[in-house]
Amino acid sequence: MSTTSSARNSTWRNWGGNVCARPAREVAPASVAELAAEVRRAAEDGLRVKAVGTGHSFTSIAATDGVLIRPSLLTGIRGIDREAMTVTVAAGTPLKRLNTALAREGLSLTNMGDIMEQTVSGATSTGTHGTGRESASISAQIRGLELVTADGSVLTCSEKENPEVFAAARTGLGALGVVTAITFAVEPLFLLTAREEPMPFDRVIAEFDQLWAENEHFEFYWFPHTASTNTKRNNRSAGPERPVGRLAGWFEDEFLSNGVFQVAQWVGRAAPAAVPAIARISSRALSARTYTDIPYEVFTSPRRVRFLEMEYAVPRAALADTLRELKAMVDRSGLRVSFPVEVRTAPADDITLSTASGRDSAYIAVHMFRGTPYQAYFTAAERIFTAHEGRPHWGKVHTRDAAYLSGVYPRFAEFTALRDRLDPERLFQNDYLRRILGT
């Protein structure tokens, strides 16, 4: 099998519909050697290079007018090492495919984000995370990776081999090269018991430290224009396995959370004045439930309603103040916010530009339905987040630049120096990277 390519000047769009690009050509290499050759060819032709997965980033991190690399032929598990408890997987493999394959082998990742449509390289390159008291992002579970650099070389990186590249490339933003394979730590398949229940906003804020300390994975959603949240506590369980019933799962996760919610968003977009009433109804729609299942069935949920999102990581100790300020801003404004605000946590990690690099973090994500004006809400929220030294999620809407980011990332200069060494001619540059990393 060989590279497939297209010289058609077709338009690429992301999942959220807010980013589009017209690459000069698109290629889908069938091997690492072919990908390296495409990188060298692009350099010879004077074209920039970007790799794109499923387009779930809301920033233009993957946009290019040069060569767009699609890793659709670089998929599948390369190997499982049961002694080392690792799995090596090709970069274009969707997280869903990886999770189901691992489960068949009696294995699992330790933690996950809340969706699994992304490719493994796209998810890790942008810092995708779930929530966890001790267990961190997907990138923090990486034990090795393979990277094609600007001169077409193939680097293998780990704590022992090219450690300075490994420290940065686990969340590399597509700035250091094209990731072609990732080795993840895995563990024996386990069960999680999820407990979901409504809780008043004031109570969850007052008891947040206790809720965080008592649960391996704690998160909650606050419904703007209300004083209500829906909380979720995931903890390991000895079983027995008691998944959500098929009918109950369809009703709550598909009919209510996607179908009815989609209709509510249409109504809110057409009649913004109705949004607070819709929010009050939505906050009462989901009842408490408890279920036990394998990890990816608990961590992830179907997301079929399309939206735009901004997410910032603030110091975990600043979460309560930040949320109170966000709620006060919404309450006193004329904004009509129809999507819930998602709150999660992560422990500090040692990845150079991870949003949790060097500090325990809390994530606050604000959303707006696609096609609804979002700039005023996101601008006001961002002002609050940055007042608390927030770090924007690399794949979600934000307006920060290198001048700001260098002040909230102690190892920022370390990353840019490595980029200067690996990509001095900026083959992997685009407008987004120019803004967040500088020239």
Image (cartoon, grey):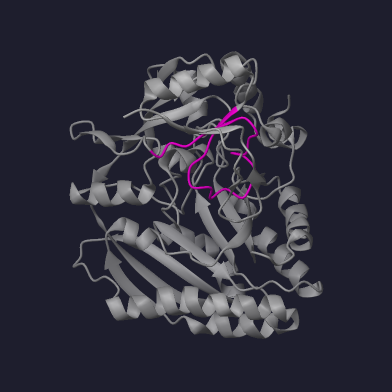
The kind of secondary structure the magenta stretch mainly shows is loop
The N terminus appears in which quarter of the rendering? top left
Does the stretch in magenta take in 213? no
Residue 420 visible in rendering: yes
| Coordinates of residue 62 in the picture (x, y in percent) | 59, 39
Q: Residue at x 48, y 74 (%)?
A: 257
User: Is 331 situated left or right of 132 in this image?
Assistant: right
| Coordinates of residue 430 in the picture (x, y in percent) | 67, 32
In the image, is residue 108 above or below residue 339?
above
| Coordinates of residue 262 in the picture (x, y in percent) | 55, 75
Q: Which residues are magenta?
A: 49-72
Q: Residue at x 53, y 18 (%)?
A: 41
Residue 225 visible in rendering: no
User: Is 254 situated left or right of 422 in this image?
Assistant: left
In the image, is residue 152 above or below residue 437?
above
The C terminus appears in which quarter of the rendering? top right
Q: In front here: 365 or 136?
A: 365
Q: Residue at x 44, y 56 (%)?
A: 115
| Coordinates of residue 70 in the picture (x, y in percent) | 47, 37
